[in-house]
Amino acid sequence: MESTEKIRVLIVDDIAETRDNLRKLIQFEPDIEVVGQAGTGEEGVELTKEKRPHVVLMDINMPGLDGISASEIITRETPASQVIMMSVQGESDYIRRSMLAGARDFLTKPFSSDELIATIHQVYERSRKVMVQPVGPIAAAAVAAPPPRQGRIIAVFSPKGGVGCSVIAANLGVVLAQAGKNTVVVDANLSFGDVGVLLNLTGTHSLVDIAERFEELDTDLISSVLATHDSGLKALLPPPRPEMGEMITAQHLQETLSLLCGLFDYVIVDTSTSLQDVMLTVLDQADKILLIATPDIPCVKNMRLFFEVIDQLDYERGRVMLVLNRVDRHAGISPSDIENTIKHSVTVSIPADHRTVMFSVNRGVPFVLREPGKPVSEAIFELASELRGIFDKVRVPEADRVAAPGGRSRLSRLFGSR
């Protein structure tokens, strides 16, 4: 560690024996000190204000003010203190609720000493660049209030990798931007994002800038780190190196998306396959989730599991638009087969066209621009039309969907009036 200061830890748990055990696990660490213990959520909130710990170890289930509610208060009133939630329950709903309450990590009891110490260090290190330690009390994090929300968040997600999420997100963004909609694509695949490559965009700015300057986050900062594609599409690029993805927290993305909604009509978020706190934050905020699937048995299996998860998370199934990618009539699995299996209708089917897509990917030129008359491009136009029909109440006349002479679509008329 670069700093010589000790990591100050507050323990909050209603069981005295647990508090004592945690203290014993920590006491031999030279760079960590326990600055206090609390047996209730209420006491934990007050001690956090008084002691200003770097890290709060918070039990999730306590009588009175539980860990979730206490964490929400601490996040709001003492944002420099980072909460690590602890629970004997490790279900996704507990993790999701904890992260939405502002917790930075989650430990499932019982955990080892190594796990505990490593988590404390990781949470502390991730927060160092954005921590604010004022001398007097503060009421909220020093984050600029977002402008009134006007934009729509569209999360492009799949529980299976390699199904084409990034390609669809990039091409969809280009189509919406060319249709006159103020659109930004956010690459939230924090370790291996490809949107910049697909759009042939390079730049020195990325989501890392948001993490490093989070305390001064506002619309000006966000605008300054966006890259611009020739189509007019804006892009917020992922961290330049995989290990830097650890710097981006759920709170970073939550605040960033909220601000972007005040600047853009459409905020398209390319995601990873993870269902951890960062991705759950994106899905929670999304107005629509484009669930990307391919017609193969492993993907269909994952789709079915995903719908079981969103039912547990109380997501409305109407928020999910199922997009079937790489459809091939010779594959042996039809769209209707998939609909019958997962009990959800397919919104758009995108035909398989390996040559067109691979040429587009390798050249960094979206296929909707290079070959707009191809069926694979027409499917993206249709998807954009469906979204505009939902959000803008714009329907594309059937006559405008036909190809113009030479196989090129009537792009100027595809979306009707703006």
Image: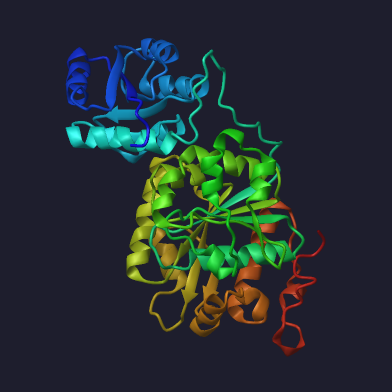
- Quadrant location of residue 56? top left
In the rendered structure, the answer to whether residue 36 lies left or right of residue 138 reads: left
Height in image: 271 above or below 164?
A: above
Q: In x, y percent, where is residue 329?
A: 46, 81
Q: Residue furthest bottom?
A: 406
- Between 46 and 411, which is closer to the camera in this rendering? 46
* Numbered label tally: 0
- The relative height of residue 232 versus residue 144 in the rendered view (above or below) is below
Q: Quadrant of the N terminus?
A: top left
Residue 57 seen in render: no
Does residue 312 appear in the picture of this structure?
yes
Is 174 positioned to the left or the right of 79 in the image?
A: right
- Along the viewing direction, whichever of 146 and 125 lies nearer the viewer: 125
416 displayed left or right of 303? right
Q: Residue at x 31, y 15 (%)?
A: 35
Q: Quadrant of residue 96?
A: top left
Q: Kindly identify the residue that appears in the image at 61 percent across and 69 percent down.
A: 380
Residue located 60% across and 80% down the image:
375
Residue at the image point whose x is 40% and y is 34% from the top: 104
Q: Residue furthest right?
A: 417
Say which of 414 and 365 sits in front: 365
Q: Quadrant of the C terminus?
A: bottom right
Residue 162, image x, y percentages: 41, 68
In the rendered image of this protein, does residue 285 appear above or below residue 154? Answer: above
Position in image of residue 201 (x %, y %): 60, 66
The vertical placement of 88 against 306, above or below, is: above
